[in-house]
């Protein structure tokens, strides 16, 4: 980016991220209304990580007031060495294409990853175009509600969660699907646990508190399926092999949580706002940002995240069904504009963040499906997971010289 453009570009990214994002309760239950404090006009109103965002209602009510001990309900899960790695890299890509440019990587990712029907949808879409995707799993989606008090988040009551907890059928279904997705080459990252946003959320957590949060995620993955089933069930993957995180609502003290990530051997953070440019490292990790884009047909700046696009279009309010085709076309045009900008700038990656959602009559899921289907088979494009991109960067480095985007 040209030095003279830094301040103006930073301002529009701050404005875009203020709209925030909202995770989706289990099995796609609707979220609450949009935040009234966000300014969709493009004017920055504060720091991008401090504004409250909509909090989804728990979809699984508490089922037991007292937790039981793990030994009373399940056997010890299998050793970690027998479990799948969460971030497989089974493909390699050239450093340069025949035209001399690097491949144009498109990374599609999803936060939460709870809804089993939408798991089926996105795995099927990926299979049709040989894409790999990243799914940032929320820990409670693998942990039973009657054990919720095992979780003790900072500044909250034991068992607090703004996205609910799992039930036996859902947990075991997700365990199976996660194994299958990893076998297909998809990556599982972490979206942490309770999804606490806003002024009383994760923004004030320290490195030590983030270390505890990631440890809680590990325990939910390792023990949740067995606790839900009442017998030994192998975890879907080894949580120690998770390599990336997207924080809830894109918030958090970045140096604090990135230090906790680095101490665990994690490789990238996918939480920060940014630009269409080649990634750089920050605080010892690759910074894979959600990128600032212009909503097609307008001057509005937003981020490459489905919730932010929804907010830019209708302030995160459901529009009449008759408007869905035009809204979808606008989102698709926004993605196509971003693709063209990448091609004009040396092929830096596109990072498209999403949720398992049916928001606004499924406008965002449908637009993304169309974009993936029409783009991932184009000769210069490779649709990859975050970990596949990190592996390519480790091998070839960030492109330099005349092909470096401005």
Image (tube, helix red, strand yellow):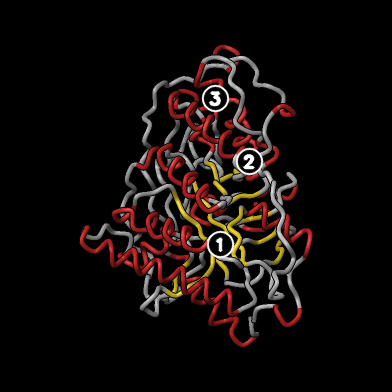
Kindly report the distance in space between the C-alpha atoms of the residues bearing marks 2 and 3: 18 Å
Question: Which residue is at the far bottom?
Answer: 4
Confirm whether residue 201 shows in the render.
no
Mark seen at residue 238: none
Observer-side mark, 1 or 3, equals 1
Q: Quadrant of the C terminus?
A: bottom right
Image spot of residue 53 (x, y percent):
41, 55
Q: Determine the secondary structure under disc 1.
A: strand
Q: Which residue is mark 1?
A: 351
Whether residue 18 is situated above or below residue 69 in the rendered picture: below
Determine the secondary structure under disc 2: helix
Earlier residue among tags 1 and 2:
2
Question: Depth check: 64 or 318 in front?
Answer: 318
**Residue 225's mark?**
3
**Residue 262 visible in the displayed image:** yes
Tag 2 and tag 3, C-beta contact below 8 Å: no
Where is residue 14 shown, x and y percent of the image?
50, 71
Please tell me which residue lies in front, 271 or 212: 271
138, 336: nearer the viewer: 336
Residues marked 1 and 3 touching at CB (< 8 Å): no
* Residue 197: % across, % down: 47, 51
According to the image, label 2 marks what residue?
214
Q: Residue, x 67% and y 53% (percent of image)?
A: 388
Foreground residue among 315 and 332: 332
């Amino acid at each position: 980016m040209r030095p003279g453009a830094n301040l103006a570009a930073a301002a529009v990214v701050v404005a875009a991220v203020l709209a925030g994002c909202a995770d989706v309760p289990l099995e796609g239950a609707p979220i609450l209304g949009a935040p009234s404090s966000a300014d969709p006009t493009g004017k920055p109103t504060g720091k991008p990580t401090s504004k409250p965002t909509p909090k989804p209602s728990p979809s699984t009510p508490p089922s037991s007031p007292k937790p039981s001990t793990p030994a009373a309900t399940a056997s010890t899960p299998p050793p970690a060495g027998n479990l799948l790695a969460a971030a497989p890299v089974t493909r390699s890509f050239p450093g340069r294409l025949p035209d001399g440019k690097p491949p144009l990587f498109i990374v599609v990712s999803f936060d939460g990853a709870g809804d089993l029907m939408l798991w089926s949808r996105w795995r099927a879409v990926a299979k049709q175009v040989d894409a790999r995707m990243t799914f940032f799993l929320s820990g409670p989606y693998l942990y039973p509600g009657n054990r919720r008090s095992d979780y003790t988040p900072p500044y909250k009551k034991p068992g607090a969660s703004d996205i609910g907890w799992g039930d036996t059928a859902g947990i075991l279904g997700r365990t199976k699907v996660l194994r299958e997705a990893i076998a297909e080459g998809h990556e599982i990252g972490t979206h942490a646990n309770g999804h606490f946003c806003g002024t009383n959320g994760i923004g004030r957590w320290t490195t030590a508190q983030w270390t505890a949060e990631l440890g809680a995620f590990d325990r939910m993955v390792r023990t949740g399926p067995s606790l839900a089933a009442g017998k030994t069930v192998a975890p879907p993957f080894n949580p120690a092999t998770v390599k990336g995180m997207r924080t809830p609502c894109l918030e958090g003290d970045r140096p604090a949580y990135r230090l906790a990530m680095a101490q665990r051997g994690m490789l990238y953070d996918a939480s920060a706002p940014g630009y269409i440019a080649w990634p750089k490292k920050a605080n010892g990790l690759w910074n894979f940002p959600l990128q600032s884009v212009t909503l097609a047909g307008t001057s509005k700046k937003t981020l490459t995240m489905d919730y932010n696009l929804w907010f830019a279009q209708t302030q995160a309010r459901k529009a009449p069904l008759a408007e869905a085709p035009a809204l979808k076309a606008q989102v698709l045009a926004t993605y196509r504009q971003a693709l063209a900008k990448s091609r004009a700038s040396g092929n830096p990656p596109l990072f498209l963040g999403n949720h398992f959602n049916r928001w606004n009559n499924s406008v965002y899921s449908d637009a993304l499906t169309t974009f993936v289907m029409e783009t991932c088979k184009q000769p210069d494009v490779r649709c990859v997971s975050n970990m596949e991109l990190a592996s390519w960067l480790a091998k070839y480095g960030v492109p330099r010289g005349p092909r470096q985007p401005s």
